[in-house]
Amino acid sequence: MHKIEPKALVDRFGRRVDYLRLSVTDRCDFRCVYCMAEDMRFAPKAEILSLEELATIAEAFVELGVRKIRLTGGEPLIRHNIMSLIERLGSLEALDELVLTTNGSQLQRLASPLRDAGVQRLNISLDSLNPRRFRQLTRIGHLEQVVAGIDAACDAGFERLRLNAVIMRGRNDDEVLDLVDFARSREVDLAFIEEMPLGLIDEHDRALTLATSDWIRERITECYALTPLGDPDGTAGPARLYRMAGSDSRIGFISPHSNNFCHLCNRVRVTVEGRLLLCLGNEHSVDLRDILRSGADAATLRQALVDAMDLKPERHEFNVNDEPQILRFMNATGG
Ligand code: SAM
Ligand code: SF4
């Protein structure tokens, strides 16, 4: 076996992987219509990674040069004892960025502890400002709880907050400008994400509801001119960023359908069942749980991560008119 060089996570296409999206639970206190079926079956406890196993995997990635970890799920903040994992990762010196994606439901309680534990930035999902509609889209959630959570996060002093919105034609497409104005009022960023065909949902027909980034951008420019920004602080990832006159809030568009960003891909995902997914839009994976539970030492785990890079496909193929090729739901994938 050859010796592993530090920063060895490079795939066959020369892309360096330095970003891990780690799913800490597949469970959620919401059931968003584009993410989950109404009646979901979650992984049994024996099949999900313990907090210790999650930390071991995260630390192996950091030793191999990963500099950014995003905790996600499901809803990461409903995992029992999640703060202990976050505190452990927050103290890793080699990790430059620890960030988290949340639906905001627990932020009134946890925004300050997260900041204190070293989480630098949060993405908070918000698809509607109408309480009844918010309820319909999340099937369970309460808008006022999430808005209070966003305000708690604003007060806690995160470096940059970003709201994530999935716009669906005929459902919340009349709220594009309201969401922009809300972001401006809180001085936070706002990213619009095109709905991706992950998991079979019966709630709506994705081919009919897809609101493309171009369509959303046209709605915004009816009110605010948008100036392309590039990626000034290196945090945009696949989002194309714009600024608006008279506001610090930036608008981002994540367009898996209308804009292929795979050539820039620097990330991999680990599901809470320990599956290392090399690409959001493909099934190529490695079972890290098997490796961990077979008693492998840290070096063997690291070697498995290095070897897995050869499986990273060149690009994803999403076609909204086809049946989803990816039968995992977003909550199982780690959004
Ligand atoms: N529960 C957290 C939340 O909602 O922010 C984190 C996990 S969630 C799966 C992460 C992000 O994925 C959310 O912003 C959500 O809107 C987005 N998402 C879920 N399903 C999606 C889909 N089918 N297409 C596009 N985005 C999706
Ligand atoms: Fe839960 Fe997030 Fe999926 Fe909504 S998008 S159901 S909040 S995991």
Image: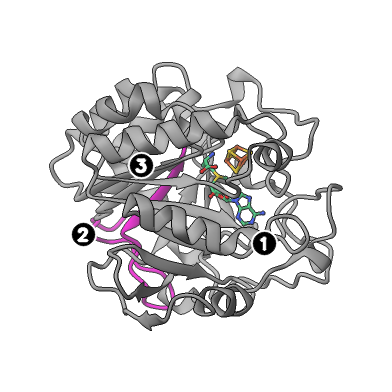
Q: Return the residue at label 1.
A: 174
Q: Which residues are magenta?
A: 1-23
Which is more N-terminal, label 3 or label 2? 2
Membership of 183 in magenta stretch: no
Which is more N-terminal, label 1 or label 2? 2
Contact between labelled residues 1 and 3, with CB atoms less than 8 Å apart? no
Q: Residue at x 38, y 25 (%)?
A: 108
Mark 3: secondary structure: helix
Q: How far apart are the two marked residues, 2 and 1, measured between alpha carbons?
A: 52 Å
Q: Is residue 10 left or right of residue 254?
A: left
Residue 82 image point, x, y percent: 39, 23
Residue sitting nearer the eye, 31 or 74: 31
Residue 61 image point, x, y percent: 31, 47
What amino acid is at disc 1? Asp
Q: How far apart are the two marked residues, 3 and 1, measured between alpha carbons?
A: 52 Å
Q: How far apart are the two marked residues, 2 and 3, measured between alpha carbons?
A: 14 Å
Q: Residue at x 42, y 67 (%)?
A: 251
Q: Return the residue at label 3.
A: 300
- Callout 3 environment at 10 Å: few (<14), some (14 to 19), or many (20+)? few
- For the N terminus, the quadrant is bottom left
Residue 184 image point, x, y percent: 37, 58
What amino acid is at disc 3? Thr
- Callout 1 environment at 10 Å: few (<14), some (14 to 19), or many (20+)? some
Residue 267 image point, x, y percent: 41, 60
Q: Return the residue at label 2.
A: 5
Residue sitting nearer the eye, 15 or 98: 98
In the picture shown, does residue 291 fall above or below 234?
above
